[in-house]
Amino acid sequence: MTDPAPGGGLRALMRSGTSIAIAVGVMNVATYGFTMIAARVLGPRDYGALASLMATLMVFGVFQLGLQATAARRISAEPEHVGQIEHSIMSVTYRGSLALGALLVLASPLVNLVLRLDSLLAAALVGVAAVPMSIMGGQTGILQGERRWWPLASMYVAAGVPRLVVGGAFIWWRPDVTSAMLGVTVAMFAPVALGWLALRHKRETGTSPDHGARTIIWESFHNSQALLAFFALSSADVVLARNVLPDQQAGLYAAGLIMTKAVLFLPQFVVIVAFPSMSSQSERRQAMLRSLGIVLVLGVAATLAAWSLSHLAMIFVGGAEYAEIEPRVWLFAALGTLLAMLQLLVYSVLARRGQRSVYAVWLALAVMVAAGLTTSTVTGLLTVVIAVDTVLLALLLAASMTILRRPAAVVEESVVS
C-alpha cells in the first residue's frame, strides 16, 4: 500500500490527483463519445429512451458508490486493518451485487412500463449491468482508501474506453435501444477484470469487530441512501421529461443533459482525491473549501465556453438534429456546475459520517418532481431544476460551514446539516 498523499494544500491535492484526473478525463471523453454516437445514430426518440435507461442505472449505481465510500473511508482511517476491511468489503460486494441484479431483472416489466420502452430485454439489461457496476464499487473503494492511484486510474479508463468501442460497435451493428444497452452491459465487465488483478494478492493484517460484514452493510446502506438522494435528484429530470414532454422534446432535453453530465463529471477527480482528507477531522473544512473552489472554477469555465462557443458545443451534444436547444446549452452547463458542487457537499457529509444532511436532498427531489410535473416545455422544466438545485446548494453550504466551525469532536448535526 502506498503512503497517503500529503495533505494541506492545493498543490498537494492536484499532484496526488494527476493520474486520476487524466484517467477520469479519458473515461469521460470515451463515455460521451459513446453518448454522441448514440444520440446521432439513434435519433431523438430512441436516444431519449436510452438516456432514461442510463439514468435509471445511475440511480441504482448508488450501491456501487456507497460501497466505494465505505471502503475508502475505513481504509483511510484504519490502514492497519486493511486486510480485514478488504475481505469484508468484497464479501458484501459480491453478495449485494448479485441480489441487486436479480431484483432489477425481476422488476424489468415495471421499468419497461414506467419508461415506455417497448423492449422488455432492454429493461432487463439494467439488472445485468448492475452486477459488474456494483462489484467495481467495492474494488475502487479499496484502491482509493489505499491511495493506489495508478491501478485505480486504470479501472476508470476501462470504465470508459470499452463502452465507446464495444457499445459503439453494437449501435452501428443494430441501431436500436436494446443493442445499445447490450453493448454498455458487456463493456462494464472490463474494469472488474482489472480490479480483480489489482486485488488478487490478499493481505494479513489486524482484525477489529468494527469491520465485520454487519457494520459494513450498515454504513454502506447509509452512504447509498445519501447518494441515492443526490443521484435521484440529478437524474429525475430526464425521467420527468419522458412523462411531461412530447417524445421529440424529451429527446432534445436528454441531449441537453449530455452537456450537464459532462460538466458534472469534469471535476470527478477532485472528489476522489479529496475524500480521504475530508474524512480527517483536522483537514475536513480546508479540504471541502479547497475542493469546492476547484469545482466552481472548472464549472464556470465550462459554462462560459458553452455560452461563447455554443455552435461548437452542439457538435458534442448531438449535431444539427438538436439545434433547437442551442440557445439554452449554456444553461445545461450551468446545471452541471450546480450538480458538481452539490455532489462534493454530499461526499463531505459522508466523510464526516453525517446523518441528517440528506433530508434536505430528499426534500429537494420531492419539490422538483412536484413542480416538474406542472411543466410542458424544455425551458420550463430546465428552469424548475436549476431553481431547486440552487436553493439546495445554498442550504447545504450554509449548514456545512456552520458544522465545520465547531470543535473537532463528535458533532450533533442540525436538521439540515
Image (cartoon, grey):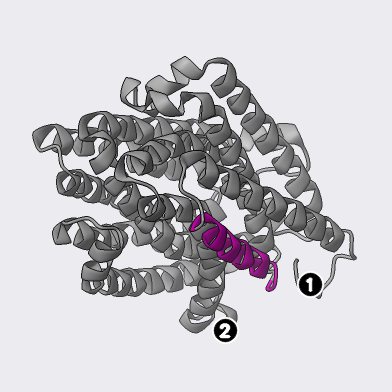
**Where residue 69 appears, x then y in whole percent?**
54, 61
Is 93 colored magenta in this rendering? no
Separation of disc 2 and disc 1 at Cα?
26 Å
- Depth order, front residue of 7/315: 315
- Left or right, 413 with respect to 151, comes to right
**What residue sits right under mark 1 in the picture?**
413
**Where residue 386 appears, x then y in whole percent?**
61, 45
Residue 352 seen from this side: yes
Mark 1 Cα-neighbour bin, 10 Å: few <14, some 14–19, many ≥20: some
Q: Is the residue 106 above or below the residue 316 in the image?
A: below
Residue 209's disc is: 2
Please tell me which residue is depicted at 21% across the width and 35% down the height of the picture.
42
- Left or right, 55 with respect to 359, comes to left
Q: Amino acid at mark 1?
A: Glu
Mark 2 Cα-neighbour bin, 10 Å: few <14, some 14–19, many ≥20: few
- Depth order, front residue of 417/7: 417
Q: Is the residue 354 above or below the residue 76 in the image?
A: below
Query: Magenta part of the protein: which range?
Result: 355-373
Is 372 colored magenta in this rendering? yes
